[in-house]
Amino acid sequence: MPIEFVGGLFPRNQLAQRAANASPRLDLDYLRDLARAHEHAGFDRVLIANGGGDPLFLAAHAAAHTERLGFMIAHRPGLVPPTVAARAFATLDQTTGGRIRLHTITGHAPEPGHGEFLLDKAERYARAGEYLEIVRRTWTSDQPFDYEGRFYRIEGGFSPVKPLQQPHVPISLGGSSDGAYQVAVQHTDLYALWAESLEDTSARIRKLHEVAAAAGKPAPRVSLSVRLIIGATEELAWKKARDIEAALKAGTATRGRIEQQGLSGGAERQLALAAKGEVHDKALFLGTSTAIGGGTDSTSLVGTPDTIVEALLAYHDIGVTTFLSRGYDPLYDAIDYGYQIIPAVREEVRRREQQRQAA
């Protein structure tokens, strides 16, 4: 089973102190350097999340300063017309040489600040399904098409610009609710999970395969989002993890805990797992998640490089094909991952595959 590594790309140094009157300007030099660090470290692509700048434009800038690095671009269905989004992604796929992925973020809550008020989560996933269907048809149709759904009505939808990647730009999705499984199976090739225990992650992968089988569809591949906290010894790794936990708690005390804004299904699962213990399967640490009140890809693997490689391989053994791993010091962590983690995981996966073929 192929292995893929995804990092994180940001337009500002997240460690830099930011005053209340800090400049809103993007740090394009940092964005360039971070993208190049990921490319040289051997990452396949980087996730560009919403917030801090438009992900499409950030990807375009980073692509101009890299040669091979791919871009996993967070996109919220429903905020722009699907045909407009399809044309924008097709254009970027052409200008980057086929290096992008559309990553669907349906969200646990509406976004009234953007004029989006659809409260019911199941309805938002149903709308996301229609949205992605229209996006894919726009990418693949060589003639104008009509569409009539519950949420969208299109007459003569068409884009003269098609993606360079065929049959279309790949699509991934993150989410924990039942609707997320359904949309992932119908419209995506990669389903993104936040890291939980091996037992819980295995159960979620089984459910994904069950939903796919019931729909008569191939199951999407599985991505696992987890931070990596590395130390030369186990003791140093855990000291580093505790220091990060303390810093997160201090920052949370200033900004407020995430649960005050409502919890996603994934965040609820994180906090429920943390209630059973802060360490699972030897290396999975929940302290970095509970420090911010749950939510985001904030669970961590802690240990020496050997420990973390072993932990990642254990997830690969249960069906994870993609690891979305970003650190708390993004630039230097990307370099460390490329030196200490990525080559070792790839080599062991290659060795195991050769053994299976020989057998």
Image (cartoon, rainbow, N blue to C red):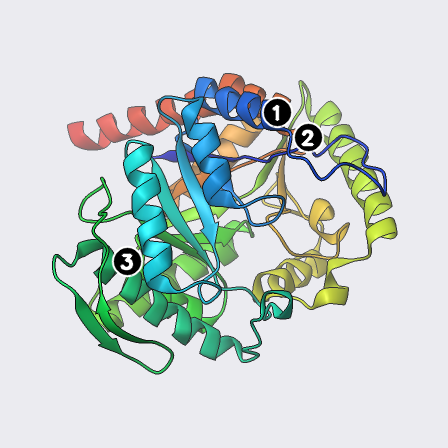
The three-letter code of the residue at mark 3 reads: Ala
**Residue kind at label 2, given as amino acid type:** Asn
The residue shown at (28%, 58%) is 219
Query: Helix, strand, or loop for circle 2?
Result: loop
* Above-or-below relation of 246 to 331: below
> What residue occupies the far left of the structure in this picture?
142
Q: Residues within 10 Å of mark 1 (few under 14, many from 20)?
A: some
Q: CA distance from mark 1 to mark 3?
A: 37 Å
Residue 3 in view: yes
Residue pictured at 24% horizontal, 75% vertical? 147
Which disc, if any, is residue 30?
1
Q: Is residue 202 left or right of residue 248?
A: left
Q: CA distance from mark 2 to mark 3?
A: 37 Å
| Viewer can see residue 1 | no
Q: Nearer the viewer, mark 2 or mark 3?
A: 2
* Residue 71 drawn at (x, y percent): 42, 37
Disc marking residue 219: 3
The answer to which image quadrant residue 359 occupies is: top left
For residue 13, the mark is 2
